[in-house]
Image: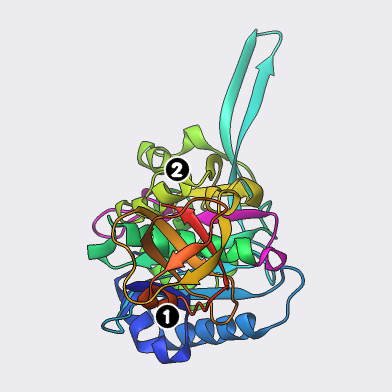
Amino acid sequence: MLVMRPALMADLSEVQRLAADSPIGVTSLPDDVERLGDKIAASEASFAAEVSFNGEESYFFVLEDTATGRLQGCSAIVASAGYSAPFYSFRNETFVHASRELKIHNKIHVLSQCHDLTGNSLLTSFYVVPERVRSPWAELNSRARLLFMASHPERFAESVVTEIVGYSDENGDSPFWDAIGRNFFDVSYAEAERLCGLKSRTFLAELMPHYPIYVPLLPDAAQEAMGQVHPRAQVTFDILMREGFETDHYIDVFDGGPTLHARVSSIRSIAQSQLAQATLQQGAATPGGRPYLVSNTLLQDYRATLLELHWAPGQPLLLGAAAAQALKITEGDDVRLVAV
């Protein structure tokens, strides 16, 4: 069974294994033991804190195979994007250039650097091992974060954003970065993302142009890369689009990948999740049924997994012994669930 839970410092070596294989552009998952250790420590402090509104907290989850103890994925939530420094994006805009005398009226696509999304909660650090990418476990790795948000709404903002890794070729070159960012910070895209992972994205974003960029002046390759998704990030993009996230308004300032945005109240796993009371049965659960993502409603002991269940809304949820143990559930506890 695979179970999502909060990351612990004891997971550091396994988390570094995941980070080493994550695609270029996932700067929130750097292949650096010190940064990863800081990330886990900050998460442990956030889970332990008493919180009544979203602030500087970050919550880092891992997906563990309980049979082997090996980690199969990870994901995270930052309570407030840009809490300590602005969260930069490029905003897609249209400028109108018109001349009555010449009877010319042109609409031109421009990119304007902004920090409109600062203060929103941010989904980050998604990674799942290749053999789990096209499985329901990838859904658990992404969506169980949303069930956690549903159970602890006071810890998060009313809107959520996430940056999807944009297009780069097999050599790690990004045509969008080469057309814009490289003119202001003369390093490769891979090196720029490495520096962002070790330091922060803000210091590089602040070197980017603060005036509107006229998209028709960019090379064709850079224009085509805008809003494109890296093949290895397609799974998380697809999951979140099914959740009700929207694109088109913002793109990443480095690789041009799409930035998704959604109101918490309209996210499927939050809006459609339901609470049920657990009833425990001895032995294994009845086989078959519909697949559900199921979580407890705890904080530091948060657990979520994927189960096939025979359940109807308004009824108690019958759980087998193994599932109850994995979820840290006892008789009568509340559980939150949503259909896959």
Q: Is residue 183 visible?
A: no
- Mark toward the start of the polypeptide (1 vs 2): 2
Identify the residue at horizontal 29%, vertical 71% (top origin): 21
For residue 86, above or below residue 94: below
Question: Left or right: where does residue 332 sit relative to residue 13?
Answer: right
The residue wearing badge 1 is 325
Specify the label residue 227 is tagged with.
2
Question: Left or right: where does residue 234 sit relative to residue 144?
Answer: left
For badge 2, the amino acid type reads Gly
Q: Position of residue 9 (x, y in %)?
A: 46, 90
> Rounded to the nearest whole Å, what is the CA distance between mark 1 and mark 2?
43 Å
Question: Left or right: where does residue 49 sit relative to residue 242?
Answer: right
Outermost residue toward the front?
Answer: 282
Span colored in magenta = 152-177
For badge 1, the amino acid type reads Gln
SS at badge 2: loop
Q: Nearer the viewer, residue 109 or 286?
A: 286
Q: Position of residue 1 (x, y in %)?
A: 31, 73
User: How many other residues sit within 10 Å of disc 2, few (<14), some (14-19) or many (≥20)?
Assistant: many
Specify the label residue 103 is tagged with.
none
For residue 151, above or below residue 95: below
Q: Position of residue 179 (x, y in %)?
A: 43, 48
